[in-house]
Image: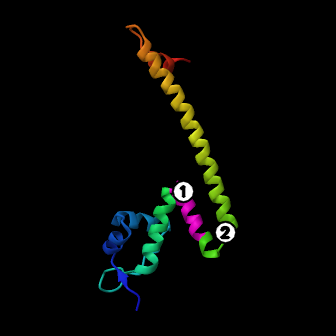
Amino acid sequence: MAEKLTIGKLADAAGVNVETIRYYQRRGLLEEPVKPRDGHRHYPVDTAVKRLQFIKRAQGLGFTLAEILGLLRLGEDCACAETRKLAARKLALINQRMADLASMKRVLARLVQKCDARNGGTSCPIIDVLAQN
């Protein structure tokens, strides 16, 4: 018989909180086992821990829970081409965010320089820029 874990032991094994597991169950990312008469649900250690680790790694790569649910469903069908498309879209989004952040960094750096260069004026250059119409 395969080893089974209670929700607390599963949380420890996967490095997540019990409430995280419950949330994933509500979102459909993780199956909730049937509650037996003794009152304690038991999760299969081999599949439940791997699934939680998959979810956490996908989140670390920037995938949303809805996207992760899609990846999990695709994984069941061995749909590598579709999975690649999702990953490529995520990569393009990350590249765009990085470009946006670089632009924000340049603007903020210029504003900080203006603030540093001001000669005791009463108005703040940063506030002035932000207040412009």
Residues at discs 2 and 1 in contact (Cβ within 8 Å): no
All told, the count of numbered labels is 2
Q: Which residue is drawn at 59% across and 65% down?
A: 70
The image shows residue 83 at horizontal and vertical percentages of 64, 64
Give the overall secondary structure of the magenta segment. Answer: helix
* Residue occupying the far right of the picture: 81
Q: In which quarter of the image is residue 85?
A: bottom right
Image-quadrant location for residue 33: bottom left
Sequence-earlier tag: 2 or 1: 1
Q: Quick one: SS at disc 1? A: loop
Figure quadrant of residue 84: bottom right
Asked if the stretch drawn in magenta spans residue 69, the answer is yes
Q: Is residue 20 magenta?
A: no
Expressed as whole percent of the image width and height from the top left, the position of residue 86 reads 64, 59
The residue labelled by disc 1 is: 63
User: Which of 22 and 127 lies nearest the eye of the viewer?
Assistant: 127
Q: Are there few (<14), some (14-19), or many (20+) residues within 10 Å of tag 2?
A: few
Residues rendered magenta in the picture: 61-73
Label 1: few (<14), some (14–19) or many (≥20) C-alpha neighbours in 10 Å: some
Say what secondary structure mark 2 lies in. Answer: helix
Residue at (59% x, 66% y) in the render: 71
Give me the residue at 67% from left, 69% from top: 80
Pick the front one: 57 or 6: 57
Question: Mark 2 highlights which residue?
Answer: 80
Residue 110: image x %, image y %?
51, 22
* Quadrant the C terminus occupies: top right
